Image (spheres, rainbow, N blue to C red):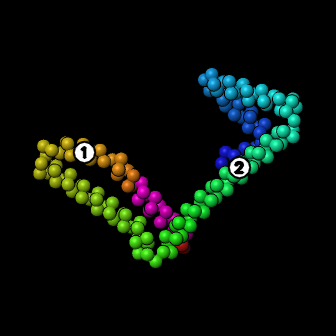
């Protein structure tokens, strides 16, 4: 995405913008980079760097933007093909994988909450350690819930697109 922006605005404007931004950072390396970019900008403005060289640099940035866009397109094409394959699959497991995962996650969460409720109600002396142990599971729950959230979000998008 940055490469596409560079290709649109051109090298001289980019040098000026980045140099100004780096000049605001209170760090010696940033100040040094800002000074170097200012020198490059001045060299371009004075013609010490030929317009042909600047033009070639802009063409290189455009080429880099095309490579980046092609890579992103290929990634999205693969993701979409995977989703299409899943949707059109006749294999019941593949077609039901997302809901099955959701049901398993919900059943696991229910079992955990019932176990905690049982301990709180019938063994209150152990409740603190059980609740503390539950907190240790937050990372694994966040992963599972994140995956489920993506599944639900993507399925919602699929249904909206089918209208």
- Assess whether residue 159 is covered by the magenta stretch: yes
The residue singled out by tag 1 in the image is 133
Q: Does 44 sit left or right of 91 as displayed? A: right
Residue at screen point 56% across, 65% down: 80
Name the spot of residue 58 as percent of width and height, x first: 79, 43
Q: Secondary structure at mark 2?
A: helix
- Assess whether residue 30 is covered by the magenta stretch: no
Q: Secondary structure at mark 1?
A: helix
Q: Is residue 88 above or below residue 141?
A: below
Residue 37: quadrant of the picture: top right
Name the spot of residue 30 as percent of width and height, x first: 64, 26
Q: Is residue 28 above or below residue 138?
A: above
Magenta stretch: helix, strand or loop mostly: helix
Range covered by the magenta-colored residues? 146-161
Comparing 70 with 143, the one in front is 70
**Residue 65 tag number:** 2
Residue at screen point 37% across, 63% down: 101
Name the spot of residue 141 as percent of width and height, x first: 34, 51
Alpha-carbon span between mark 2 and mark 1 = 49 Å
Name the spot of residue 36 as percent of width and height, x first: 73, 27
Residue at screen point 42% across, 54% down: 146
Q: Does 2 sit left or right of 46 as displayed? A: left
Residue 145: quadrant of the picture: bottom left
């Amino acid at each position: 995405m940055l490469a596409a922006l560079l290709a649109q605005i051109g090298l001289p404007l980019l040098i000026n913008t980045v140099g100004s931004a780096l000049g605001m950072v209170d760090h010696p390396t940033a100040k040094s980079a800002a000074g170097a970019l200012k020198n490059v900008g001045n060299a371009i403005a004075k013609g010490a760097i030929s317009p042909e060289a600047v033009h070639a640099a802009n063409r290189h940035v455009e080429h880099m933007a095309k490579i980046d866009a092609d890579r992103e397109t290929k990634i999205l094409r693969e993701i979409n093909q995977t989703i299409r394959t899943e949707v059109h699959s006749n294999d019941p497991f593949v077609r039901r994988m997302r809901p099955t995962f959701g049901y398993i996650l919900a059943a696991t969460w229910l079992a955990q909450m019932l176990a905690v409720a049982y301990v709180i109600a019938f063994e209150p002396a152990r409740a603190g350690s059980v609740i503390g142990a539950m907190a240790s599971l937050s990372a694994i729950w966040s992963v599972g819930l994140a995956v489920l959230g993506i599944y639900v979000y993507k399925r919602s998008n699929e249904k909206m697109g089918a209208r």
